[in-house]
Amino acid sequence: MTIPMEYGLLLAAILFCIGLAGVLVRRDVIFMLMSVEVMLNAAGLAFIVGGAARGSADGQVMFIFILAMAAAEVSVGLALIIQLYQKFKTLDADSASQLNG
Amino acid sequence: MNILFYIAALIAIMATIRMVTGINAVHSLLYLIVSLLSVSVIFFLLGAPFIAALEVIIYAGAIMVLFVFVIMMLNTGSSGVKKEHELLKPSTWIGPGITSAILFGEMLYVLMHPAAHPMTRTEIQPAAVGALLFSKYILIVELAAFLLAAGVIGAYHLGQKEKVSHHRYLKNEEPAT
């Protein structure tokens, strides 16, 4: 494979920035959580590219940890979304800006 | 082999853009799954077959099914779609879009500055990953187990409904005014 390593890192950067823009722009909490998933996946891709460039397995180990962290984050985040919807009857993140229960 | 990388990268970028700009949550979720699958193809091309399988099984399989169940449970219908149309005005997204583009430009500059290193395609077998995982990184594996346990307990606690007690002594006390 003769692709330079920078192209793989560039793809990770593009995906990360799209996810970042999604978190900043969208106000629907489900879309925000999906954009966070895209950002985590891009970070994992950067680890895999770095590991592939050096021929070591450390990058893949790091990806497994990112995967475990993403699974825990999604389960708690979706439980919070359900609570938000039961309280406010909307998925708009701006509706929960008061913090008074 | 190189052309496969570029095709998969292009599909990943396009699917992710459609995911972020989509209106319907289920359609966006399907685009996100396409993006994850194409990233999995890239993992396979980079010589990480075990990680490619994990990406399909855990990300595109388990985590996305969680999203599908929650969208199905909430059943927001078309009321949220109208709201999102109002939110996707240019005045809403132009500020975050420009700041993200500036960050991307900085990363582009940093990545393109040094000389190019070619990626070696040495396939790393799952046995090597597992051996490293349970020798050098055993402490982080235990920490990840703690994190998953906290996630399970947190999701259980947050997901349960508020209990309604009919007896007057068992009701939650009103805060003192």
Image (cartoon, coloured by chain):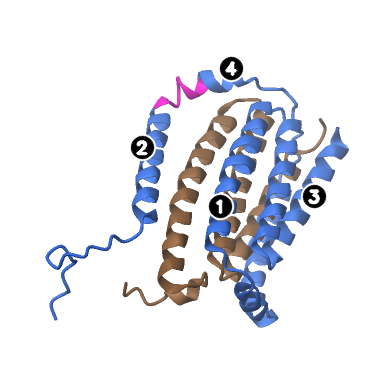
Chain colours: A brown, B blue
The residue pinned by badge 1 equals B69
Q: Amino acid at mark 4?
A: Ala
Q: CA distance from mark 4 to mark 2?
A: 24 Å
The residue pinned by badge 3 equals B11
Q: Residue A85 at what x, y percent from top left?
A: 46, 67
Question: Which numbered disc, 2 or 3, marks the residue that appears first in the sequence?
Answer: 3
Q: Are marks 4 and 3 on the same chain?
A: yes
Give the label, 1 or 2, closer to the camera.
Answer: 1
Q: Amino acid at mark 3?
A: Ile
Question: Which numbered disc, 1 or 2, marks the residue that appears first in the sequence?
Answer: 1
Q: Are marks 4 and 2 on the same chain?
A: yes
* Residue drawn at point x = 65 percent, y = 28 percent: A54
Q: Is residue B113 visible?
A: no
Q: Chain of mark 3?
A: B
Query: Is residue B147 rendered magenta in the image?
Result: no
> Label 1's element?
helix
Q: CA distance from mark 4 to mark 3?
A: 31 Å
Within 10 Å of disc 4 (Cα), the crowding (few <14, some 14-19, many 20+) is few
> Label 2's element?
helix
Q: Amino acid at mark 1?
A: Phe
- On the rendered image, what quadrant is the C terminus of chain B found in? bottom left
Please state the extent of the stretch shown in magenta in the rendering. B132-138
Within 10 Å of disc 3 (Cα), the crowding (few <14, some 14-19, many 20+) is some
Name above or below for residue A95 compared with residue B42. below
